[in-house]
Amino acid sequence: MRFPTPFRWSRRLFTSTIRQVEDEGDWFYASEWWGGDDNDDGHTVFRSHSVKGNGSVTVVGYPSSRPDAVHWAAVERWLQRRYEKIYPDCDENLEKFRVLGYQWRVLRFNERTRQSTVKVMAAYRKSASEAVYLMQQPHCLAVPYVKSMIAAGLSALSSTRFNFKGAVHGDRTLHILCIGLGGGSIPLFLASKIQGAIVHVVEIDPVVIKASIQAMGFPSHSTKNASSGSLNSMDPLDQVLWGGLHERLSLYEADAEGFVVKRAAEMSSPFYDLVFVDAYDGDDLFPRKLWNADGPFLKALATILHPDHGTVVVNLHADTDSLTKCTSPLFHPLLPMGRHVYQVCKAYKQVLEEDSGAGGSVLSFSVSSPWVQNISLVICRGFKATTMTENRSLILNTLLSSSQDVENLLKLPFPCIQYLKNGFLLIDSL
């Protein structure tokens, strides 16, 4: 759905500055990559079978209309400058870069469920035209639920006493854990936009890792060596594409439960400040061990989450077919909360409220994603609003105010308010 004119009018009043940045991942372009189940405009660029419960893993490529070819020359010059900085004695004419184009890449499990959509740039060097380099475009967030998770999570964290502005400018470290890789859009976005971000990604399926690196332009040098724990060696051309990003982005092939439990046993500090959980399998199920209130995962997650401002964001599929539905008038009427989502929300709220610090109240809320049936659950320790119970307006206004800071600091091409106000529900009110 599109928001009506009154929304756009109120948006102009709410925003202090008007940005003219085009959102290349706007839902307006969804017809290029979403399509239907019988959409034959794309071509398969990767296919492999998973033994970790994801079935057939495929990546399908679709043509992208943005950015226009007129902008490619600027990207070629940017690549050239980076290359010459690393190799100052290179032959400028021989080592010129050329952009082949841009493409959507869609990750699917079992040919049906869309797990991730990213935009990639393909480029080559004139002296080695047989080698094509894929670079995921980290600024482009296509799937609405990803924008919802980013907007809700960062706005909540910014509403605590955590120095988010300092993290954006690199004056303060922001420790982030992403459970589930998919195409890698969330960790890449965070690492590229927030200079102080140290991002750990945990993915259980080596086939998903292979697909994201080979077909979706995720940086290969971010993977951790299983034996030594060190980052894989970096190709010089990776340095051209990604600069020093590899020093702040680490990808682990590991089971999320085992990883988190091990971290809790070993870690004294630092804690994780922000955690994203997006871990659906090939059957489109959220593993119970990742939301069992009595299991080791949630208890360990509560331990490694910063007690004063730690924030967790969980992607959930709205179970609209459930027979048991929440009838709260505060929730989006098109996406009723069924039994499964309700149980997940209450489990995270119950466990993560434990061991929180004295820096403020614990806020638990959810928002629904426009255009797709996803819910973003947020648990935030140290929320600054003092009157928590039932004061929906105060909490929402605090989050909306913080969202403006997030938008301006990160120069986002999309409005956070759109994703915060859509189906906003306090878990405490259930």
Image: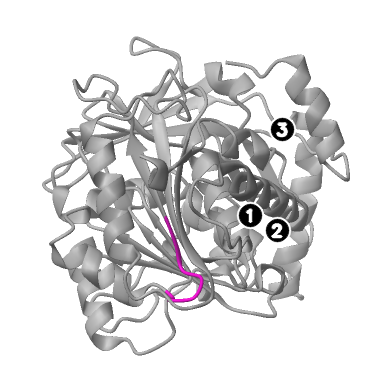
Mark 1 against mark 3, which lies toward the viewer? 3
How much space separates mark 1 and mark 2, taking CA atoms? 6 Å
Mark 1 touches mark 3? (CB < 8 Å): no
Quarter-of-image position of residue 192: bottom right
Say if the magenta span includes residue 311: yes
Which segment did they paint magenta? 306-312
Mark 3 touches mark 2? (CB < 8 Å): no
Q: Which numbered disc, 3 or 2, marks the residue that appears first in the sequence?
A: 3
- In which quadrant will I find the C terminus? top left
Most foreground residue, 194 or 165: 165
Q: Badge 1 local density, few (<14 within 10 Å), some, or many (20+)?
A: few
Dot 1: element: loop
Residue designated by label 1: 127
How much space separates mark 1 and mark 3, taking CA atoms? 25 Å
Mark 3 against mark 2, which lies toward the viewer? 3
Residue designated by label 2: 95
Residue designated by label 3: 67
Left-right relation of 34 to 98: left
Residue type for callout 2? Glu
- In which quadrant will I find the N terminus? top right
Q: Say how the picture is coloured.
A: one colour
Residue 276: percent from left, percent from top? 41, 56
Residue 286 visible in this rendered orientation of the protein: yes
Residue type for callout 1? Ser
In the image, farthest residue toward the top: 38
Residue type for callout 3? Pro
Residue ID at (86%, 35%): 13
Residue ID at (27%, 27%): 319
Dot 3: element: loop
Q: Badge 2 local density, few (<14 within 10 Å), some, or many (20+)?
A: some
